[in-house]
Image: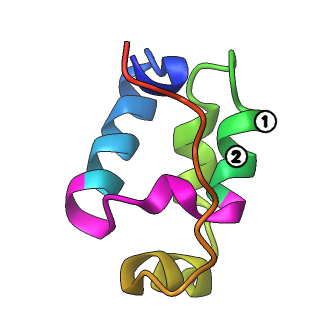
Amino acid sequence: MKYHLENSDDLEQYVYYTLLVNKDFDQHPLVKKIISSTRGKPGEFARELKALPEATRSEIKAGKFEHVKTEASNG
């Protein structure tokens, strides 16, 4: 599974952002840091995404950010 997210709250936020905000949300520099810092900490990914500043959420939604390539793959 991409990013090894297994917690239901983490998966819910991942799907929400992927389907309803921006499919490339995980390429935002701050989100990339969150992915890295919350690895192996169930529920933390969801908590961090829910706490994103409104300005960051707006950037992600508009796709107006420097895209950082992700290293994770499905599987």
Q: Nearer the viewer, residue 44 or 1?
A: 1
In magenta stretch: residue 42: no
Residue that appears at 31% across and 68% down:
21
Give the Cα separation between the discs numbered 2 and 1: 5 Å
In magenta stretch: residue 25: yes
Q: How packed is label 1: few (under 14 Cα within 10 Å), some, or many (20 or more)?
A: few
Q: Secondary structure at mark 1?
A: helix
Against 74, residue 28 (above or below) is below
Q: Where's the C terminus, which quadrant?
A: top left
Against 51, residue 3 (above or below) is above
Q: Which mark is residue 37?
A: 1
Q: Nearer the viewer, residue 19 or 53?
A: 19
Residue that appears at 52% across and 84% down:
59
Q: Amino acid at mark 1?
A: Ser
Mainly helix, strand or loop, the magenta region? helix
Quarter of the rendering containing residue 1: top left
Q: Residue furthest left?
A: 19
Q: Nearer the viewer, residue 10 or 62?
A: 62
Left or right of 23, for residue 31: right
Q: Secondary structure at mark 2?
A: helix
Residue that appears at 43% across and 15% down:
6
Left or right of 23, for residue 56: right
Magenta highlight range: 19-30
- How are the residues colored? rainbow
Left or right of 10, for residue 21: left
Q: Which residue is mark 2?
A: 34
Residue 24 percent coordinates (x, y): 40, 60
Against 59, residue 11 (above or below) is above
Quarter of the rendering containing residue 47: top right
Q: Amino acid at mark 2?
A: Ile
Left or right of 21, for residue 1: right
Q: Which mark is residue 18?
A: none
